[in-house]
Image (spheres, rainbow, N blue to C red):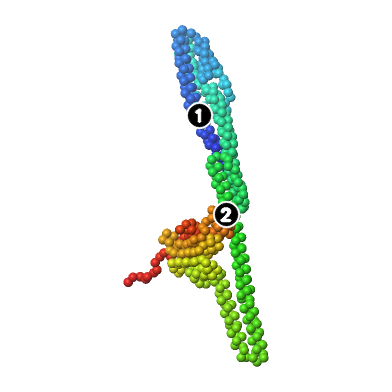
Amino acid sequence: MPLRVRLIISVGLVLLVSLVCGGVLVGWHAGKSVQTELRAALHVAQETVRNGLDELIRTDDDADQLRHLVATFNGNRHVRAALLDDGNHPIATSELLGPIQTVPGWFRHLIGGDPGLVRIPVGPAGASGIIVLQADPANEISEIWAASRDAALILAGFALLSISLVYAMVGGALRPLENLSDAFERVSRGDYNRVVPKHGPPEVIRLADGFNFMTRQLISVAAQNRRLTERLLTLQAEERADLARDLHDEVGPLLFAVDMTAATIERLARFDRAPEIPTQVQSIHDAIGRMQRHVRAILERLCPLQAMGLEVAINRLVAFWRSRRPDIEFVVTVSVEEDRIDDDLKETVYRVIQEGMSNAIRHGEPARVDIAIEHDETSGIRVEVRDDGIGMPPDGIAGGAAAQLGLIGMRERVMAMTGSLTIQPGYTGKGLVLVARLPCVSSLQPPDRGTPE
């Protein structure tokens, strides 16, 4: 059921309950008022009859005066008078004024109570019998019914008007929420380009602002993910190309040489030239040794940490760059115990250093690059790559989109380990300092020295 309908039903129920409670309270007060009014009218009628009887005694008139006394109640709104003889047969009866409004029976039953009855004996002077005064609530109930009906119609009109206004106002207030719901449904399908218009109450406007900001962030993240995926695919393609080139340029010729040497050995054996065979066998051993070294180098490049450990892998990485850039001085400081660092953390440390060195060497034009891995008392492990190159250009990270993607990849890898990554100007005002802080509580614990005796 829509929220608007639920709100209207709730408001209608509240108004209905209020109307019923008000009607019950009004009916109770009306019943009290009718009883009070009838008692007062009956009291006045008694006084009137007694005064008339007193006059009748003083004037010593006949029974016609009693009929005249009863006739004085003709047209009375609340009391009917009747003159009865000694056998309780009516001699004269007054005519009660008829009610203006027709009252439903259920309302008369609800409001009406004991109307009241008074019997006044007539004295011995000139007549005998009884005058009966009976209260009749018909006119009073008719007045109350007319007033209650008008009040109920007014309240019903007010309730309908209130519900209509609430319906219109709630509809206007909830229409932006319907737009938000539709926009969220689009986001769930991967469409982040929906912009929610900002109109409605202030709370809805803040929701629209937050949603639009969220979609902008999602668009940015989706674009970054696409670029990272493209770069990952590019790196995988480059890695495959490097492996194919190494296998083709290095291992392939060696395998061909082994095959040719084996064929030569077969030919020498066929022509009884056995003294020459050991030389060919040694050639095979040399070729296989060179192939083993190439395969080992490929494995070290693919899985450097599992193959040789963190510190050795970093030194190999530095040696790789030192052989290609002898003009750059490299300084490596590793002061952590590798046995207390798990493989995921080692991989993150290595990749941060790899990307940091690559960016510094390719884009920073440094003369010196410092790499440091040490304990950090606040986080666990602190990794620093510092260079003295050109530093940060005014328009952002040097190297363009490739360096930006590399930085994003580093940051996401560090954040996945619940760490932090910062890039700041060099300590001497030259170059940049890349600092990664990674949690590693176990690395801060002292080694187990055994239980003291």
Three-letter amino acid code at the position of disc 1: Val
Three-letter amino acid code at the position of disc 2: Val
Which residue in the structure is indicated by mark 2? Answer: 221
Q: Position of residue 70 (x, y in %)?
A: 51, 14
Q: Looking at the image, can residue 345 be seen? A: no
Q: Is residue 264 above or below residue 2?
A: below
Q: In which quadrant of the rendered view does residue 179 lie?
A: top right
Q: Looking at the image, can residue 297 be seen? A: yes
User: Which of the pair 376/340 is nearer the observer?
Assistant: 376
Image mark count: 2
Q: Is residue 271 above or below residue 183?
A: below
Q: Is the C terminus in the top left, top right, bottom left or bottom right quadrant?
A: bottom left
Outermost residue, left side: 453
Q: Is residue 56 above or below residue 354?
A: above
Q: Secondary structure at mark 2?
A: helix
Which residue in the structure is indicated by mark 1? Answer: 26
Residue at image position (49%, 15%) is 129
User: Which of the pair 166/134 is nearer the observer?
Assistant: 166
Q: Which mark is residue 84?
A: none
Q: Position of residue 430 (x, y in %)?
A: 48, 58
* 344 lies left or right of 249: left
Q: Position of residue 137 (x, y in %)?
A: 52, 23
Q: Position of residue 374 (x, y in %)?
A: 44, 64
Label 2 neighbourhood size at 10 Å, few (<14), some (14-19), many (20+)? few
Q: Nearer the viewer, mark 1 or mark 2?
A: 2
User: Which of the pair 119/202 is nearer the observer?
Assistant: 202
